[in-house]
Image (cartoon, helix red, strand yellow):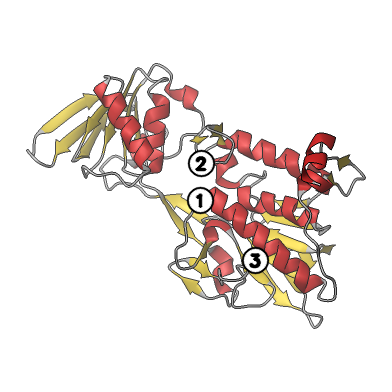
Amino acid sequence: MISTDILIIGAGPTGLFTVFEAGLLKLKCHLIDALPQPGGQCAEIYPKKPIYDIPAFPEILAGDLINNLMEQIKPFQPGFTLGERAQTIKKQDDGSFVVTTNKGTQHKAPIVAIAGGLGSFEPRKPLLDKLSTFEDKGIEYIIRDPELYRNKRVVIAGGGDSALDWSIFLSDVATSVTLIHRRSEFRGALDSVEKVQELKNNGKIALITPAEIIALEGDDGLKSVVIKKSSTQEEIKLEVDHFIPLFGLSPKLGPIADWGLEIEKNAIKVDNALDYQTNIPGIYAIGDVNTYPGKLKLILCGFHEATMMCQSAYGRIFPDKRYVMKYTTVGGVHGFDGSKKEAPKAVVKSIQ
């Protein structure tokens, strides 16, 4: 049986950053993830997708963010159980929890932090004839390698951040990019909407709204799509190499939904006024998997939630100890492997 201080379910950005914050408190972590490598969706689905709202990084690829997080937590030597799904949880007489995976691996910890992101997920697919025929033959639901679209004619459908961000990114990669949305208004960040409009004005992408794709054509692979404009009912046939419908993911909590946690709209309710604890003391939920009034599903919000959760976890594990927070600029970072990153002396002098 694997024993640790904090058992983290989910090795995405929030789960990985939890290791760092716990390490500063001298708490050991072990992570469980159903994917074969750390990083969650950032590594498995969007490794080449640019992210714009990580502090101090005007732009960073999702895969690079994961690499940086892995480097940041290296001194704290976290354990990983990868390629296995957390299946069951049982509370022990001493108040700790035992979590067993679908492959029978058992983990014991006094604290469980669920950082499962959106959980298991499937892409939302448009209702179109021949859709399955052209899957992987011109139709992709996830962009893993942007180079696949180098010098190709690409049509993207969707109105959220992914559709906007990939339209912007691929405008410098593909021969042509056409973005189609059934409404004239987009759900994504205002800055991204403005960039798309600017690219359209400069002739870098085509923007067709309000409209939707009503038919797919081709023999061995996708050759063209038929677009219907909502305002005029006009139909346009457009030759394409790739059609990418980005309508989001349909999330499922999986076995965690049966753990007795309070669930609301497929997310775990937590107390955000204090420490992001669930209705079961000792079990926390952080990142996209949780919900509370005013919740924002942003990576940076997950980082904040992880920080607050670790402070609360320390208090539960060591109820008789008082932790005095020290800024890393003063105290440096002390790893479990004996490594020590000192704060620069000039910085220390200026703070003292």
Element at label 2: loop
Mark with earlier residue (3, 2): 2
Rendered location of residue 314, percent (x, y): 77, 67
Q: Earlier in the sequence, mark 1 or mark 3?
A: 3
Dots 2, 1 in contact, CB < 8 A: yes
Residue type of the residue flagged with mark 1: Leu
22 to the left or right of 279: right
- Give coordinates of residue 142: x percent, y percent: 45, 38
How many numbered markers are drawn?
3
Residue 298 got which mark? 1
**Of marks 3 and 2, the one in the foreground:** 2
Outermost residue toward the right in this view: 338
Compared with 240, 165 (above or below) is below
Quarter of the image where one finds residue 131:
top left
Give the alpha-carbon distance from disc 2 to disc 1, as whole Å.
9 Å
Instruction: Mark 3 and mark 2 in contact? Answer it, CB < 8 Å.
Output: no
Residue for badge 3:
87
At 73% across and 54% down in the image, what residue appears? 21
Q: Mark 2 points at which residue?
A: 53
Kindly identify the amino acid type of the residue bearing the numbered disc 3: Gln
Residue lying furthest bottom? 93
- Tell me whether the residue at label 1 lies in contact with that at label 3, contact meaning CB atoms closer than 8 angstroms: no
The kind of secondary structure element at disc 3 is: strand
Q: Earlier in the sequence, mark 2 or mark 1?
A: 2
**Amino acid beneath label 2:** Asp
Question: Residue 148 location, x and y as percent?
Answer: 46, 24
Of residues 106 and 279, the one nearer the viewer is 279
Q: Is disc 1 surrounded by few (<14), some (14 to 19) or many (20+) residues within 10 Å?
A: few
Q: Distance between the residues labelled 1 and 3?
A: 26 Å
- Asked whether, in this view, residue 5 is left or right of residue 243, the answer is right
Question: Which of the image's four quarters has the N terminus?
Answer: bottom right
